[in-house]
Amino acid sequence: MNDNVGKLILRLALGGLILFHGVAKLSGGLGFVSGVVTAAGLPAFVAYGAYVGEVLAPLLVIFGWYSRIGAALIAINMLFALGLVHRAQFATLAPTGGWSLELQGIYLLTAIAIALIGPGRFSINPR
């Protein structure tokens, strides 16, 4: 029972926190993301992947409906964010002494963990 509650908490935390980023992009648009993507030499349509990784995938994770796939999509989204936006911070420390990319690292690693362990019993399809 405790492991299923733990999985639910992980799903709600990751999905809920990433979804905030998606809602910001839904309301503010993809201008920044599109600029970063095209500056890296990728086609502009790749920016729409942010909607998949930050809106659709978190909803899958939150509801536990194909949450392994949703978590994998979030992990891919985070790898793009790390590579396109945060690569200059990869080997730096924050003023408080922690890694500059702690938040992004936690998002990535939590997504990988959920993709590996599954959603738990408290989900739409607990596989």
Image (cartoon, helix red, strand yellow):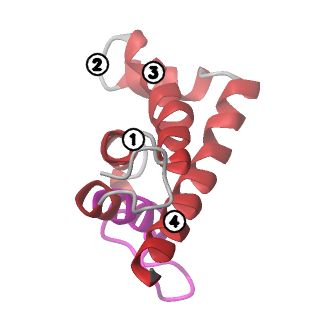
Pair 3/2: label in front:
3
Asked if the stretch drawn in magenta spans residue 103, the answer is yes
- The residue carrying pointer 3 sits among few (fewer than 14), some (14 to 19) or many (20 or more) residues within 10 Å by Cα, namely some
Q: For residue 127, which numbered disc appears in the image?
A: none
What's the CA distance linking mark 1 and mark 4? 14 Å
Q: For residue 8, which numbered disc appears in the image?
A: 4
Residue at image coords 45%, 80%: 1
Q: Which residue is mark 3?
A: 47
What's the CA distance linking mark 1 and mark 2? 26 Å
Q: Secondary structure at mark 2?
A: loop
What's the CA distance linking mark 4 and mark 2? 39 Å
Q: Earlier in the sequence, mark 1 or mark 4?
A: 4
What's the CA distance linking mark 4 and mark 3? 30 Å
Residue in the foreground of this view, choosing between 42 and 60: 60
Q: Provide the residue span drawn in magenta.
A: 89-112
Asked if the stretch drawn in magenta spans residue 48, the answer is no
Pair 4/3: label in front:
4
Pair 3/1: label in front:
1
Q: Which residue is mark 2?
A: 41
- The residue carrying pointer 1 sits among few (fewer than 14), some (14 to 19) or many (20 or more) residues within 10 Å by Cα, namely many
Q: Earlier in the sequence, mark 3 or mark 2?
A: 2
Q: Secondary structure at mark 4?
A: helix
* Residue 69 versus residue 38 in the image, above or below: below
Q: Which residue is mark 1?
A: 70
